């Protein structure tokens, strides 16, 4: 107001100054100029008021829509009025001019108006400006399929896995709006560590390579072998449910297994018994759980390259690839070691996938039982998150791609970097979802852990790119891990930079999951 009085006084003085035409012209022009500036300020104030009303209406409309079916229909209008006033806060008052709630269609339409007093335009006779906004939510039209791809590796042990459970439950509670079932929301839980566990109940599924037709099914053995038969032969070990990454490029594609494409099947993960110390030639063998000294019956001839181990002793490849040592009824020396369990389920540490479900209790149960163990494979986490969202095998609970008003979302959280441990032995690495590094599924074969990580990062990037091209919305969260390469990886994986988050502690992690839930809820706003 001081500026206005000053400018007016100057104009008046110049208007009285008869010494020249310039002063006269300025006096004529300055008042409309000041009016224009003042009008801009008044319009800016009105715009801010409109934005505040719009935000309050959107939040109120969503809240009322979520409450349909949870409170009596007659109370929904009162709830709308109270919620709107609460969301508006102080400083601006507005009245709900329209409250239209269609319970059957789950449609809520609200409108509000207010009058904003002007400062400058009042001098021209316009004392206030009418401002209005409206919001319509139609949750019956919008459906959500959300895959929670969550890092359950050993570094998440303790408070971090507890924080993750809390954060994921908070997102689930928000999306289900206080109800145990939903007609519009389905969520899958995909815990990942060094591999992903699809669940042992799928042993006989059509998409599992139960007959050993995939080219990678027998690559660790000197003779043709069926991995399920080997599991059955071991008295104290059953297939836990982990599967291996498919050969490239299928490892980054959501291609349905096809009998005409044997490599498209998912091969059960079976970590072979590595050579005993007397057959290892001094090189480290980390997954040794059976005695190599077996009768020649059923013993295959060595095909792989390797060093001779003693007089007439088998090569590394022969000792490792011999299927004869898996005698029916044999007991394996299974034990906790190296941050996993030595045995045929080596590095199969995470809980099974929970497929898309509209029952909140199933999701919460899966989250509550998550444990932290083993390594990190972000690539497989992304891929199995994507696969749970599709309508085609292996998981078929998702709606067909392109279904109108259906949103498919991956929320990817990790606290570390991709990891495959390289070793100075014939295998070049510990066993993993890619088999041994020596087999070259991550190309080229190498024993360098750093190089293997880079290859896994590249497969992760391709997986994210393909999922986004298929219409998947991806959020990423890097939790308590200050690493530039991984931060950049997750930033590029996300659908856009605003969907790539970092959280330095448990409180920030919970807030991030809640922010994502709020953003997803905002997708329900129709107008």
Image: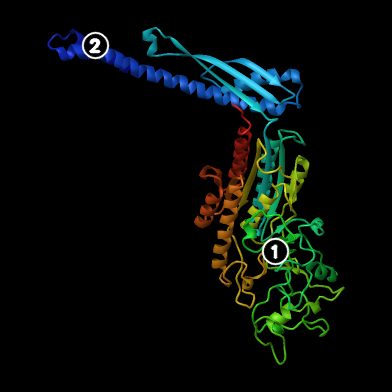
| Relative height, residue 354 to residue 299 (above, below) | above
Secondary element under disc 1, as helix, strand or loop, is helix
Residue at position x 61%, y 33% from top? 522
> 11 left or right of 482?
left
Residue at position x 72%, y 91% from top? 312
Q: Hey, which residue is sitting farthest right in the picture?
A: 329
> 456 left or right of 191?
left
Q: Which mark is residue 263?
A: 1
Q: Which residue is mark 2?
A: 28
Residue 526 in percent (x, y) is at 61, 28
Residue at position x 65%, y 64% from top? 247
From the image, state whether disc 1 or disc 2 is nearer to you.
1
Q: Hey, which residue is sitting farthest left in the picture?
A: 19
Front one among 79 and 480 = 79
Residue 321 in percent (x, y) is at 73, 77
Residue 436 in percent (x, y) is at 65, 70
């Amino acid at each position: 107001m001081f500026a206005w009085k000053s400018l007016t006084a100057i104009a008046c003085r110049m208007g009285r100054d008869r010494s020249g035409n310039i002063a006269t012209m300025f006096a004529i022009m300055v008042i409309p100029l000041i009016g224009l500036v003042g009008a801009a300020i008044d319009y800016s104030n009105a715009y801010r008021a409109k934005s505040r009303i719009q935000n309050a209406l959107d939040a109120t409309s969503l809240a009322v829509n979520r409450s349909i079916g949870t409170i009596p229909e007659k109370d929904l209008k009162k709830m709308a009025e109270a919620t709107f006033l609460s969301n508006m806060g102080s400083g601006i008052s507005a009245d709900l001019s329209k409250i239209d709630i269609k319970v059957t269609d789950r449609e809520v339409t609200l409108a509000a108006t207010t009058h904003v007093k002007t400062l400058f335009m009042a001098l021209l006779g316009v004392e206030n400006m009418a401002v209005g906004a409206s919001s319509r939510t139609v949750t019956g039209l919008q459906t959500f399929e959300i895959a929670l791809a969550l890092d359950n590796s050993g570094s998440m042990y303790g408070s971090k896995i507890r924080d993750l459970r809390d954060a994921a439950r908070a997102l689930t509670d928000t999306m289900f709006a206080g109800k145990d079932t939903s007609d519009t929301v389905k969520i899958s839980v995909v815990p990942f560590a060094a591999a992903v566990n699809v669940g042992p109940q799928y042993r006989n599924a059509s998409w599992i390579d139960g007959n050993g037709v995939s080219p990678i099914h027998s690559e660790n053995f000197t003779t043709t072998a069926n991995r399920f038969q080997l599991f059955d032969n071991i008295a104290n070990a059953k297939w836990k449910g982990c599967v291996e990454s498919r050969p490239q490029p299928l490892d980054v594609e959501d291609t349905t297994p096809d009998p005409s494409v044997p490599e498209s099947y998912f091969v059960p993960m079976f970590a072979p018994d590595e050579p005993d110390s007397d057959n290892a030639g001094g090189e480290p063998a980390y997954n040794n759980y059976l005695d190599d000294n077996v009768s020649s019956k059923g013993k295959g001839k060595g095909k792989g390259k390797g060093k001779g181990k003693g007089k007439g002793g088998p090569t590394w490849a022969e000792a490792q690839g011999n299927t004869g040592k898996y005698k029916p009824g044999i007991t394996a020396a299974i034990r906790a070691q190296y941050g996993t369990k030595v045995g045929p389920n080596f590095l199969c540490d995470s809980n099974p996938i929970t497929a898309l479900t509209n029952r909140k209790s199933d999701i919460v149960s899966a989250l509550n039982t998550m444990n932290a163990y083993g390594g990190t494979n972000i690539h497989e986490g992304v891929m199995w998150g994507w696969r749970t969202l599709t309508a085609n095998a292996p998981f078929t609970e998702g709606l067909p791609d392109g279904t109108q008003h259906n949103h498919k979302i991956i929320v990817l959280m990790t606290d570390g970097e991709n990891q495959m441990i390289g070793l100075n032995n014939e295998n070049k690495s510990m066993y993993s979802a890619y088999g041994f590094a020596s087999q070259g599924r991550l190309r080229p074969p190498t024993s360098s852990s750093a190089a293997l990580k880079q290859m896994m990062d590249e497969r992760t990037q391709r997986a994210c790119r393909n999922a986004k091209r298929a219409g998947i919305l991806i959020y990423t969260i890097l939790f308590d891990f200050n690493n530039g390469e991984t931060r950049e990886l997750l930033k590029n994986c996300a659908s856009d930079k605003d969907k790539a988050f970092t959280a330095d502690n448990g409180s920030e992690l919970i807030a991030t999951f809640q922010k994502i839930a709020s953003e997803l809820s905002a997708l329900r706003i129709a107008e």
